Image (tube, rainbow, N blue to C red):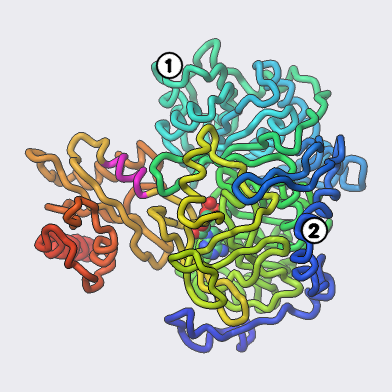
Amino acid sequence: MPPKRDRPQERMDSLLREERRFDPPPGFAAQANVRDPRVWAKAARDPDAFWAGWARRLDWIKPFRTVRKGSIGAARWFLGGRLNACANAVDRHLATPRRWKAALLWVGEDQRHRTITYQELRDETARLGNVLKGLGVRNGDRVAIYMGMVPELPVAVLACARIGAVHSVIFGGFSAASIRDRVNDMGAKVLICADGARRRGGVVDLKRAVDEALEGGACPGLESVLVFEHAGNPVAWKAGRDRSWRELMAGASAECPCEPMDSEDTLFLLYTSGSTGRPKGIRHATAGYLTATLATTNWVFDIKDQDLYWCTADLGWITGHSYLAYGPLLNGATCFLYESTPDYPDKGVLWSLVERWGVTVLYTAPTTIRACMQWGDAWVDRRTMPSLRLLGSVGEPINPEAWMWYRAHVGKGRCPVVDTWWQTETGAVMISPLPGLTPTKPGSATRPFPGTFPEVVDDEGRTLKEGAGYLVYRRPWPGMTRGIWNNPELYRRTYFSRFKGAYFSGDAARLDADGYFWLMGRVDDVVNVSGHRIGTMEVESALVDHPAVAEAAVIGRADPLKGQALAAFVILKSGKEAGPGLVGELREHVGKVIGPIAKPDDVVLASALPKTRSGKIMRRLLRDVAEGRPLGDVTTLADPEAVVRLEAEVRRLRADRRNA
Ligand code: WTA
């Protein structure tokens, strides 16, 4: 049983009433990597010197001369230097006692494991580097990666870095159309995929999605598909294009030098949803990104050589890049990887894995924590998990109840909880406790990482000392994205047009009297479903792509489990019948166009959408309707009757669901 003091005193309805505070446990504080409370003040006095100190902890082929040039939006870091990301994450450890230490400890769906030491990881990345070179990949070329959670996924990422190719991982849950768009946007020369991914006892046919994406010469720039044989599902084979990983690796040499890269050379692209429709290729530069992930992993996750560190994120997201691959490997940690989901083979698998393998640091998402709460305390309470010493959360705001549950049931009241706020664009953690120093408040990401300076501003961009507003940054940091691939204008418009001279994160936040940040979610048309950012415009265009649909509006409504859920309001083309299977068909269609994560939870076949007289859809009203709230101001509506009908349609949907 968790100690009594860790039980929530009462259910918290509003963050405003949250007054619980937890000091770092003295035992933890005494051994923490960062113990000096002056770190924030010191970094603030000279942020460039602070970051340069971290950068110097990397291995440089040629040291940098200039720490930074330019201001936010155009900043460049560590100029004149040359280095290699794979050399830093892998090769450098071979000269230390870490050489035969496990870099990766992977557990498959069948619960069998594999360990890959730093030496083996070097050899594998070298072999794959040579295979890629053999396929014509050169420094600066793009390589798309579409695999499940297998050790070969980080191997593929690091092999690209090794030879100076730009990697771009496409999440294994995305559909053929999403693969096609991304491959074409990045101009990938090679796509690395697995035959299939194991999922809850079955196999997801990844190769088939790739074949479908490339059908009919849809990706003219792509020369080869390298197929890693993992799940053993039968796959079609296109001679001349498809190549076997196992075959090519068997003949590849393990001598492959790490390419000296410029600090500002692109390390990777990662596509993310923004408020402007199509996914954007967020570009990260080598030295700045490595510096930021090295520093934050060391201080926020307090990584030590003895740690077995587990970040449950998929490598298809930024969290997987920064805190499952680069950050922990730069720190020489052992990274734990699990092939399957938190409910397979049973709903206690997270805890049995932690206990069985001795995981020490666990980093997961609020949506997973809430799902575990719903599955019942017994799954976790039967495990003591004595190895655990630190817990992290990321991806969306964590509600105080979930935070308290995480601390009490998973951490048994003895592990600090770090709620970390950041984004694909920021590259690394930006707002988070330092676990040995920062008193935590459940539901707050607490304070900025040293050397970063978030501000909360009002509508006019005035900085607030306290209160709620928009979260912006005016001062640069090295992990910041260098822009959107091939689209500088979209970059400027998306992030730098709302507030002059500032990067706008798209999030709302409240700053309390102690200077603590409370993240309040997105303010743009991006919905955070189970920690995945989904642009509502993308879902709308997928719906309108269906032959029966004339118009669609998609919004996020509150959902107890997923944080937010997608609700779609759909107008059919005249003459199209709403047959019994249509709603299911529309959901499937979105799954096919974007991927299953984007399937709307509610599809309301509406007779009209609430619009202003100038024709803009009033999403605020749709949110009210979807959440069953009384309607806000309707005076600007062109046709007030439309929402009344909509409310009735939503009530009908709810009743149907209750009866189902
Ligand atoms: C949200 C994931 C509150 C936020 C690393 C942000 C959070 C978006 C938190 C980025 C947190 C992430 N508290 N909200 N601790 N972490 N978010 O790019 O809305 O996939 O803008 O990066 O997730 O999502 P992304």
Q: Nearer the viewer, mark 1 or mark 2?
A: 2
Residue 445 falls in image quadrant: bottom right
The answer to whether 414 appears left or right of 527 in the picture is right
Q: Does the magenta stretch include residue 127?
A: no
Residue occupying image coordinates x 55% and y 35%: 485
For residue 3, which numbered disc appears in the image?
A: none
Position of 587 relative to 564 (above/below): above
Q: Is mark 1 within 8 Å of ligand 1?
A: no
Q: Is residue 401 visible?
A: no
x and y, in percent, of residue 390 in the image: 70, 67
- What residue do we see at 80% from left, 24% from top? 256
Q: How many labels does the image show?
A: 2
Query: Neighbour class for label 2 at 10 Å: few (<14), some, many (≥20)?
Result: some
Tell me where the magenta segment starts and ends, as one range: 536-543
Q: Residue 50 carries which label?
A: 2
Residue located beneath label 1 in the image: 217
The vertical placement of 581 against 246, above or below, is below
Residue at mark 1 to residue at mark 2: CA–CA distance: 50 Å
Specify the amino acid type for callout 1: Gly
Q: Where is residue 51 in the image (x, y as percent from the top left)?
A: 77, 54
Please name the amino acid that badge 2 sits on: Phe
**In the depicted structure, whether residue 559 falls above or below residue 89:** below
Is label 2 in a helix, a strand or a loop?
Answer: helix
Query: Could you say which is closer to the camera, residue 440 or residue 511?
Result: 511
